Image (spheres, grey):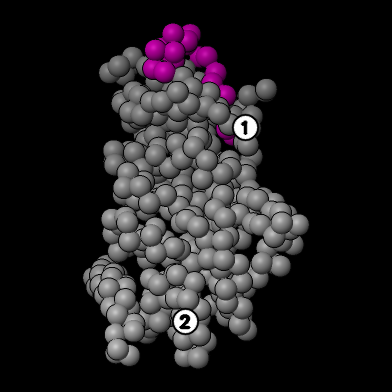
Amino acid sequence: MASCSHWWHAPVYFIASAVLAFIAISTALNSPPSKATRPTRPISNHISLNASRTLRESGFNIMATLLLISPEMFFSSPNTTIFAIKDSSLVNTSIPPWFLKNLLKYHTSPMKLSMEDVFKKPQGSCFPTLVDRKKLAVTKIDAKERLAEINHVLVSHPDMVLERQIAIHGVLAPFSSLRSKDVYLGWESIQAPICDDNSSLVSDATDPGIVLEWTRIIHLLSSHRFVSFAIGLNSVLDRILADHKNLSSVTIFAPPEFEFVASSSPMLEKIVRLHILPQRATYKDLAALPDKHRLRTLLPDVDLEITNDVNVTQGLAINGVEIAAPEILSSKEFIVHGITQAFKMAKFPNASR
């Protein structure tokens, strides 16, 4: 009977091993060859084994198995906090291996945070994860009741593991959506809150609304071959939303080629802002405006200008650039018009507000 006492390990190990095998193969196929492997912090077998045992005792079997099979996936920095995901969230969904890998990294922070450390943080504070530019936010703190929520998910098993530089907590659900329509959004699949440079919450991606709409816009721009502009917009979006916390509607002019994507961050941010109006304007709205009418942008003191007197196919241009693909994306809050080329900085007259 002793040999059968841990019969349930087999399916869990099989699932985790299969997933990790897919992850390893896909990573190897999609990664450029390198001369040296990036070193990671050596992990004590004793620490890894104890942490895995504790996770399993609390019912986090898949995370426990992954921790044993591939500890380097989690322990890539001197200090680590892991938010363990329940088995039911991983077993009952059909998610691709590459997304699972990113999801696990998003649930791991290169900081050690005990629950006492979390309770000391102000509500709305953010902290980093192993996914570049994706942060977690403390969305609820109740120190008296000893309750905390990260990305609106309850920390159900606090301080399961507290060892040296490692902390592991269990959470009731994943920090990002596992719905198929959200998972397959490509490189913007992880839905993270928007935080400013002071690590304070600006916009909450876990609530339906403007941030999720931005994610869909970026994905749509990419799928409609506005890839370089989508990359530029995505890289400066945090700072734009930090400056415009109440931004409820916008018009975006998207060029097919956006050479400014390689510009310095401050210059890129200015040029991206020049392509966005803080209001929704349909093609019909723009066509009804008189020639030389000025359009306020997200860049202070710089306007766009309606130019109907140029020889363009559809008869409407902004600063001399034709709107070639009107309303490629339209919703109640956002509208995107495709333009033939990016606006040039030198062509923008200053305007007094």
From the viewer's perspective, is residue 163 above or below residue 243? below
Q: Quadrant of residue 213?
A: top left
Q: Quadrant of residue 102?
A: bottom left
- Kindly identify the amino acid type of the residue bearing the numbered disc 2: Arg
Quarter placement of the N terminus: bottom left
| Residue 103 locus on image (x, y percent) | 42, 61
Is residue 296 located in the magenta-colored stretch of the structure?
yes
Relative depth, front residue between 344 and 125: 125
- Kindly identify the amino acid type of the residue bearing the numbered disc 1: Asn
Q: What crowding class fits label 2: few (fewer than 14 Cα within 10 Å), some (14-19), or many (20 or more)?
A: some
Quarter placement of the C terminus: top right
From the viewer's perspective, is residue 324 above or below residue 58? above
Task: Quickly name the residue at label 1.
Answer: 246
From the viewer's perspective, is residue 7 above or below residue 86? below
Left or right side of 32 for 283: right
Left or right side of 115 for 25: left
